[in-house]
Every structure is written in structure tokens, then in C-alpha cells.
Image (cartoon, grey):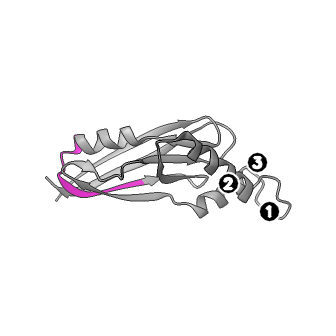
Amino acid sequence: MHQALDMLTISTQGPGLYEFTRDVRRFAAAANIGTGLLTIYCRHTSCSLLIQENADDDVKTDLDTFFARLVPQGMDWIVHTTEGPDDMPAHIKAALTQTSLAIPIAEGRPVFGTWQGIYLFEHRQRPHQRDVVLHILGET
């Protein structure tokens, strides 16, 4: 078994989906692993990871709108407010999505569907630097 490990830092400018599929493809190609499993892990609790369509930007707009309506800021029952009014809604959104992804590697490439992309889904209002860990375990 061989493995490769790297960390990406993704700069966000507020809520939204930030695609980093190209970075994942580059990492997989450089790892020199023919068949294996790629794990992508987000080291934060107020953003998340998604595999989502990357052909039409309206998908990102609709997802942003859906989550903003599902978990709006200003809910009067929230107790955790020490980090600002957007923090607890961000934690809830992250809990409803995921902080890690597993993607098969075949012939040295991630096995994505035709329109699939990898996104960091930022749930906070202000800019952040988000760390995402990439790890591949497999055979050459």
C-alpha cells in the first residue's frame, strides 16, 4: 500500500460554494496511485464539503438560497451566540451536510460523475481561510 497526504487552504469571501475539483485532480495525479481511495476532510465546524453539479452556477445559487431559508440567522431560540449571529446557524448547516468525502481512484484519477465537482460550502458571513486535508491510500 502507498499513500499521499496534502492540505489545501481555501480562501472564502463569505457564504457560498467554492469549487476545488482541479486541486483534487492535481493531487491525485501527483500521488502516483493507480487504484485506491481518496479521503477529503474539512478541519472546521462552520463549513462543510459537497459533491455537487458543476455545470450550471444556478445550482450553487439554489443551494445557497435553500440553506439560508432552512437555517436563517436570527432564530430566537439559539443559545450559542458568543461568536456572532451567523456561527450557530453555520454549525447547524455543517451538521446537515458533511465534513468528509470518500472518492474512488481508478487509473490514477478520481472517479467523478460527468457533472460532479468538489466544493467547500462556507456557512459564515465573513471571509475565512479553510483547511482541507487530502489523503489517498492505494496501489500503484
Task: Identify which amino acid the numbered label 1 is placed on.
Answer: Val
Task: Identify which amino acid the numbered label 3 is placed on.
Answer: Gly
The answer to which of marks 1 and 3 sits earlier in the sequence is 1
Residue at the spot of label 2: 66
**Callout 1–callout 3 Cβ contact below 8 Å:** no
Real-space Cα separation, disc 2 to disc 1, in angstroms = 23 Å
What segment carries the magenta color?
30-40
Q: Quadrant of residue 67?
A: bottom right
Q: Which mark is nearer the camera, 2 or 3?
A: 2
Image spot of residue 101 (x, y percent): 42, 58
Instruction: Out of 112 and 140, give the one closest to the viewer.
Output: 112
Does 1 appear above or below 16? Answer: below
Question: Is residue 121 left or right of 51 when viewed as pictured?
Answer: right
Task: Identify which amino acid the numbered label 2 is placed on.
Answer: Phe
Q: Is residue 71 visible?
A: no
Image spot of residue 88 (x, y percent): 71, 57
Rendered residue at 73%/49% (across/down): 86
Q: Quadrant of residue 102?
A: bottom left
Rendered residue at 71%/56% (across/down): 89
Instruction: Out of 21 and 99, give the one closest to the viewer.
Output: 21
Residue at the spot of label 1: 79
Residue 84 located within the stretch drawn in magenta: no
Q: Which mark is nearer the camera, 2 or 1?
A: 2
Across the whole image, how many numbered discs are drawn on residues?
3
